[in-house]
Image (cartoon, rainbow, N blue to C red):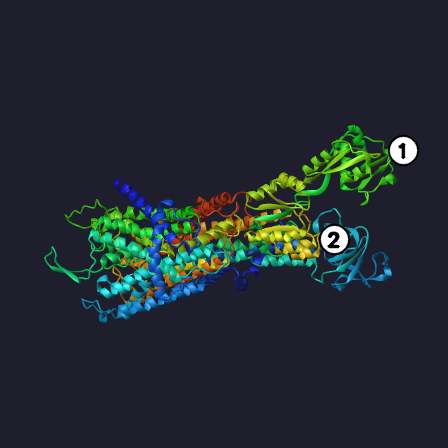
Amino acid sequence: MFDIDWEQQWTAIKQSFIKLDPGYLIKNPVMFVVELCTILTIILTIYPPLFNGQEPTWYYLTITLILVFTLLFANYAESLAELQGEAHADSLKALQVESEGKRLKNKDIELDEITEADYEVVAGEEIEKGDYVFAEKGDIIPRDGEVVEGSASIDESAITGESEPVIRESGGDRNSVTEGTEVLSDVLKIEVTAAVGESFLDRMIDLVETASRQKTPNEISMTLILASFTFVYLTAVVTMRFFGMYVDMNVDVANLIALLIGLMPTTIGALLASIRIAGMTRVTRENIIAKSGKAVESAGDLDALILDKTGTITTGERIAEKFIAVGSEKNELYKACLQSSYFDETPEGRSVVNLAHDLDVEVDESELKKEKFVEFSAKTRMSGIDLPDGTEIRKGSVEAVKEYADKIPDGLTDKAHEIADSGGTPLAVAVDKKILGLIELQDELKIGIKARIQELQEMGVKCIMATGDNERTARYVAEQAGIEEYYSEFKPEEKIALVEKIQKSGKLIGMTGDGTNDAPALAKADVGLAMQAGTNAAKEAGNMVDLDSDPTKLIEVVAIGKQLLMTRGSLTTFSIANDISRYFALIPAIFSAGIPALQQINFMNLYSPQSVVIASLIYNSLIIPFLIPLAMKGVDYKAESSSKLLRKNLVIYGGAGLIAPFISIKLIDMLLVMLGVF
Amino acid sequence: MLNIIALLVFFLLLFTLIYLFGEYIAWIYKDETKSKSNLPNKLKFIKKLDRPFKFVEDRIFSFLNIDQNKEMNWKQYLFSLLIFNGVLFIFLFLVFKFQNILPLNPLNLEGMSWDQAFHTASTFISNTNQQHYGGEILSYFSQLFAVGLAMFLSAGTGLALAPAFTRGIQNEEESKLGNFYVNLIKGLIRFLLPVSFVVALLLISQGSPQWFGGEIIVNTIEGVKQAIRVGPVAGIEAIKTLGTNGGGFFAANAAHPFENPTILSNIVLNLIMLASPMAIIYAFGIWIGKRRHGVILIGALFVIFLGLFWVTAAGEMQPNRAVTMVKGDVHIDQSLGNMEGKETRFGSLLSSLWAISTTSTTNGAVNSMHNSYNPQGSVGPFLAMAMNCLYNGVGVGLLNLMTYIFICVFIAGLMIGRAPQYLGKQIEWREVKIAALIILLLPVLVLFPTSIAVITKVGKEAIHNPGFTGFSEVLYEMFSAAANNGSGFEGLMDNSVFYNLLNGGAILMGRYLPIFGQLLIAGYLSQKKIRPETEGTLKVENLSFLVLFVGVMIIIGGLIFMPALAVGPIAEMLSGGM
């Protein structure tokens, strides 16, 4: 049930102690002040007469211990988040086994001429940036690089977890290969583009680690606010001692510390780092490398996304939806469709076969011979099959088949336009130069994409679609997906202008891209998610890289970014709302000797000044581990308008922050009395 | 019941006045703020005033050699403001110190000591008007050319900050905030002088004196002769109220029958006192093209205002606990509530209203003695000042409000998962840092000086009443100085080198450090792009945000002073004693 990694827990606990080092804690002003207070109470425990302490030693000792635990809990929260983040990076590190590479002696050699004599097998770390390596079936790619020549299928599952092999080839946008992936077929000539320790994996591990140590700009603001709040409370508490002198009472310093700790935003102060690290880890778990925490936060703040049509909104695979007979028998057409595609291995061909099977079309399979299959060629723009009796069955683009056919049946052109108008692509099918009808291919929307887009738009993130397709197709898909703004016949080079235009109107924009010509726009966009399968230029330019090369993930990143900010904000509100109870509980307790009348504020009827102080401190300390799961998981996130979100989080976290300490302190106080401590 | 109807009428009048003042002030600075709105149709006639005003202003600008078209960035703006205020400070100091050798001194009054002159000059240039002297010790020259002048110019300085700050929000990647001198003079010529004039006429009609007759010698009912000083009382009273100044011509301030002769004058002054700082918040809404926003901001603060008023009024409608303890057969009818230190012509309700009004703004004029309040009644004014005077001063009130808004926008922005943003401007760590420091300033400037005063001999010697009341006296004085309020709890013998320097320093820091920070924020904001609002943008007008805003204001602004108040008025209240 509960999957507890004991080793991780043990390391986290050890680190909690190591992090007590003041030099480390000073980065977190709130916890640093807690540490200073702890030191003060230690001194009081050893030498109570300092500041005229009147309380017994055990009292100071108890306070010291609770404070130490508060610090440890805070450190533990941070360590645990760090360890969980590193765990993912470590699983990748394991891939970095000692690899070997086949370094080419002559860089100019043609790929098909390479023999064993042309390369030397060297250890992975000996390969330098700029070297050329050769890889064939079964080889592990020794370092990140670009395919210079050749085309091969590669298993990237080690990195992406995706078992489907991918094609990597020279030229174009799918030319980069990653260290640790395996060549499944064919041969490649690769130029190494990363030096030792700079490969993708190394960088990924580094990024995960640095991201967990670096504060984001927003977190810096938060720290500043918390630090100044702390200072305000410090002022209020320190001066109480002087006020006490005025009414001739000695205000106990340990009690003042309890009030200070109660008022200071210790809860959020303790959890700030783990919120950030956990947020970053969530990104990493999505198999996305964020080059900085800032990029993740910006993602939460985007106003608009530029989404490509193919691959993001649609699956990119055109699927046969319908067979439409034009001036012919239905069955005749169905048969021809199946026959023409029987050996067609393209996704389109397969979908035609599937559709025919769904329609229970039957053909005489013995008539179909593989060698009679006519492959698609750029010249004819048709594919098909010749039957033993000499019958020619062809399918292809409507224009091509029209040229090929003797006669064009009435209504064919109209039907073809209809299909195009609904966003589809028509293919014509002909038997012996007689056109029988059309196959309607449709680019399918990705499952759930419409709902996701609607969600985003509800949250004020506008989705913009850009596609190279014609206006009709673009409009159809945009309508289907619920997108208002779209650009058709759009060239990748135009993206940069679009990004700039949107940014000029003051909006933050996110986009995805994989090609070299996407790179400028990726760099310019506030969040640029590059595809791992894309070119190195694109990956360098983007501030995030998706290892699964799934552009839809941009939407996930937006959600993670928002959740990160929301968690931070909600816990801050919780922390601040906590204060109110402290005034009512602790002020009467602290001034009890000098101003007994203040007991009237103590409406919770807490047992004694000492029990109040201890109960309040225990609450403060325990609330941290109690909230660790929330900090790590993030607050509940549902797509809603800003007003609803604010109301919800304010009620939940503000409300809980207001009430929780009242109840908890009372309960702890009762418990302490029951246990006979007081 | 009658009370409630009276209050409703009062607030109705107040809102009408805010509307009129707000639209009018917005019109004055329409160009300076790049305003997005116009005068409503029924007030279009105001535009006719433009030509005569402009005629006068042009003469002044050319006489003073001010180039109206020269715009300043935040540094230049601040620099002009500081130079102007600095020169004024030296002038005031010299006048107070050497009024004995200056003209218009028929009663041959002496010059002030150096420390009192320092405190008095600080307090008047900063729009604080905390008086460590009775008004009667000033010569006519000092009253007119130092106090009177400073009342106009310090209010004008504050007023001039509002359009500059608004410009910072309206600008898109442009650093100029306007011209300080232009904003100052326009505010004086178009708002402060004419409105003061009308108010002064009203006061004269009610019996306030306005002449330089020296003293009136009267036979009192006890049969002794009393010399009552008169002077340009009505004029000073008008600007003292309109400009959130608060320094009285007489030691008794607005409780004095010459300053505030009738119940009518009292209501007019109370209305004006609240309307001027509140109207600027309304004007801000107009400038940014969202009248609703201004109304809502005023409304959010008004909730706190009403809460405090309720606390104080409820306290003061009760009999004075000290009086009922009088022994013997003397029976004192206390059905009117606690009347100690109050004027019979105002009563306890109007006095309470005034007390909260004067401390919710940085006015500081008093029409009753706050240290005679029942403890519960005195909690209201304390808390009002603790929240840095809710509506604060003319102009600067808007800036202080924005400081809190920025902190709240930051927290609320995070809660909805967005980078914090206000009116299209992103609020980043630089702005947040300064806003946090400004909020930090008040507790530091109040609590540390209070600590010093209550534990040192020199500080304690000045305390008039023993125990918790004495603590309240000191605490109130520190609040009054640091929050630039200026009102007195009274009872503290504050005219000593110690208090003059301590308060004078707090006054100057409490005034100019926030101005520095807020102009810096305006400078930062002016350089930023404006992000258009979308569904996902934080809506600063909905109830949730206002709840958060009021909550932060109370927790960070108000409750932080809880320990101090616990030793002062709260202890007193709960102890059931004096």
Residue A416 higher or lower than B383, as above or below: above
Mark found first going from the N terminus, 2 or 1: 2
Q: Give the chain of mark 1.
A: A
Q: Measured from the top left, where is residue A298 in percent x and y?
A: 57, 53
Q: Measured from the top left, where is residue B38 in percent x and y?
A: 41, 49
Determine the image quadrant of residue B514: bottom left
Q: Give the chain of mark 2.
A: A
Determine if residue A590 is in view.
Answer: no
Determine the image quadrant of residue B507: bottom left
Q: Amino acid at mark 2?
A: Gly
Alpha carbons under labels 2 and 1: distance apart: 43 Å
Residue at the image position 58 percent from the left and 42 percent from the top: A455
Residue at disc 2, secondary structure: loop
* Residue lying at the far right of the rendered structure: A389
Which is more toward the observer, A299 or A476? A476
Which is more toward the observer, A598 or A272? A272
- Give the side of residue B180 with respect to residue B424, left or right: left
Which is more toward the observer, A230 or A484? A484
Q: Amino acid at mark 1?
A: Asp
Residue at disc 1, secondary structure: loop
Count of numbered circles in the view: 2
Q: Measured from the top left, where is residue B123 in percent x and y?
A: 31, 63
Q: Which residue is mark 2?
A: A172
User: Badge 1, how many Cα within 10 Å: few under 14, some, many 20+?
Assistant: few
Determine if residue B94 is in view.
Answer: yes
Residue A5 higher or lower than B458, as above or below: above
Q: Measured from the top left, where is residue B150 in percent x and y?
A: 30, 62
Which numbered tag is attached to residue A505?
none
Query: Are the residues tagged 2 and 1 within 8 Å (C-beta)?
Result: no
Q: Which residue is mark 1?
A: A389
